[in-house]
């Protein structure tokens, strides 16, 4: 089934760096990262229902409806707001799953933002961020809606200026389970904390890293192969817990030339960094 009506976009994100700087007593890792949005996005459409039912109207490979963060987000907003309205939801996936690009979290954030408007619940972004945090650590960032300096367990967000860039993103044929990487005994968990000023200086020199990357590369040869090739085209690193890898360029032409040079066995795309979420920002 295809729903009529406008598309609501759910953009992907990149971690420009990711440091693990500690661990709480409850086992959650303390992180520092810089997130930026890119224009590679999933698409959602909605049909509002009067009977309170919430359904996904199309199949999504590998994601049962009851486990879909988008559906769970809609039901959480419904329960929290007390609305009697429901929705049919169509989800068109374009963001690779399990790649560290935040697709499921972005879908959930777009559902919260869109239905808050369409249902007229008007909870506002701060409250929606609180709801999103109940479902996943990255969801508050997408509701925040702009490039951000991220700390804590992903719950402390500050606006961040990121220079305009074009990115090549390669998608290894590998799903990397995030919990496995964070449980790895060899994971570095004591990286020295950065200040935003330090990050800005390093960004100019591209001397950044992802603490999860060595763990993933040691366990997933396809991620290593893709990263090693992309590193031959420019400064490259993994995003999130992997396995997608990326490199930044000053122009679309440079990025497209790099992507065109990839081996035929590698899949990927070019994306532009965007200043804010298509549904706005705080």
Image: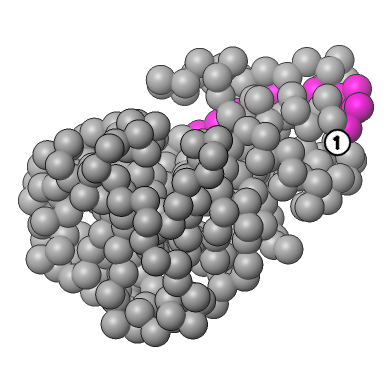
Q: Nearer the viewer, residue 123 or 187?
A: 187
- Across and down, in percent, residue 55 comes to 67, 18
What crowding class fits label 1: few (fewer than 14 Cα within 10 Å), some (14-19), or many (20 or more)? some
Total count of labels? 1
Q: Position of residue 109 (x, y in %)?
A: 64, 43
In the rendered image of this protein, does residue 250 appear above or below residue 84? below
Q: Which residue is mark 1?
A: 119
Q: Is residue 82 within the magenta segment?
A: yes
Q: Is residue 107 left or right of residue 171?
A: right
The residue drawn where x is 55% and y is 48% is: 153
Q: Is residue 22 magenta?
A: no
Render colour scheme: one colour
User: Looking at the image, which residue is at 88% across and 32% down?
Assistant: 81
Between 114 and 75, the residue placed more toward the observer is: 75
Secondary structure beneath disc 1?
loop
Q: Quadrant of residue 6?
A: top right
Q: Is residue 268 visible?
A: no
* Residue name at image x 45 percent, y 67 percent: 193
Q: Give the magenta-colored segment's residue range.
A: 81-92
Q: Quadrant of the C terminus?
A: bottom right
Q: Residue at x 84, y 18 (%)?
A: 52
Which of the two residues, 35 or 112, is positioned nearer the viewer here? 35
Q: Whole-percent x and y of residue 196?
A: 51, 76
**Front residue of this view, candidates 210 and 204:** 210
User: Which percent across, then down, holds residue 38?
Assistant: 46, 59
- Quadrant of residue 69 in the image? top right
Taking 211 as reference, is 55 left or right?
right
The answer to whether residue 68 is seen in the rendering is yes
Quadrant in the picture for the N terminus = top right
């Amino acid at each position: 089934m295809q729903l009529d009506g406008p598309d609501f976009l759910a953009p992907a994100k990149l971690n420009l760096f990711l440091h693990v700087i500690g661990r709480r007593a409850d086992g959650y890792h303390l992180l520092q990262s810089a997130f930026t949005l890119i224009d590679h996005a999933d698409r959602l459409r909605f049909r509002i229902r009067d009977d309170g039912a919430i359904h996904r109207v199309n199949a999504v490979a590998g994601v049962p409806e009851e486990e879909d963060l988008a559906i769970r987000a809609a039901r959480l907003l419904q329960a929290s707001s007390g609305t009697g309205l429901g929705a049919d939801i169509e989800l068109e996936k374009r963001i690779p799953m399990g790649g560290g690009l935040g697709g499921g979290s972005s879908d959930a954030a777009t559902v919260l933002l869109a239905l808050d408007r369409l249902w007229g619940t008007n909870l506002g972004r701060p409250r929606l961020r609180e709801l999103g945090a109940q479902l996943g650590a990255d969801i508050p960032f997408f509701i925040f809606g702009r490039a951000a300096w991220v700390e804590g367990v992903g719950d402390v967000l500050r606006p961040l200026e990121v220079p305009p860039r074009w990115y090549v993103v390669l998608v290894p044929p590998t799903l990397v389970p995030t919990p496995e990487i964070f449980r790895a005994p060899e994971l570095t968990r004591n990286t020295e904390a950065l200040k935003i000023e330090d990050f800005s200086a390093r960004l100019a020199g591209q001397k950044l890293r992802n603490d999860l990357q060595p763990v993933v590369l040691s366990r997933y040869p396809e991620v290593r192969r893709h990263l090693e090739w992309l590193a031959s085209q420019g400064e490259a690193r993994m995003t999130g817990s992997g396995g997608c890898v990326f490199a930044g360029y000053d122009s679309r032409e440079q990025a497209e030339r790099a992507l065109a040079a990839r081996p035929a066995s590698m899949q990927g795309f070019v994306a532009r960094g965007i200043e804010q979420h298509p549904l706005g920002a705080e």
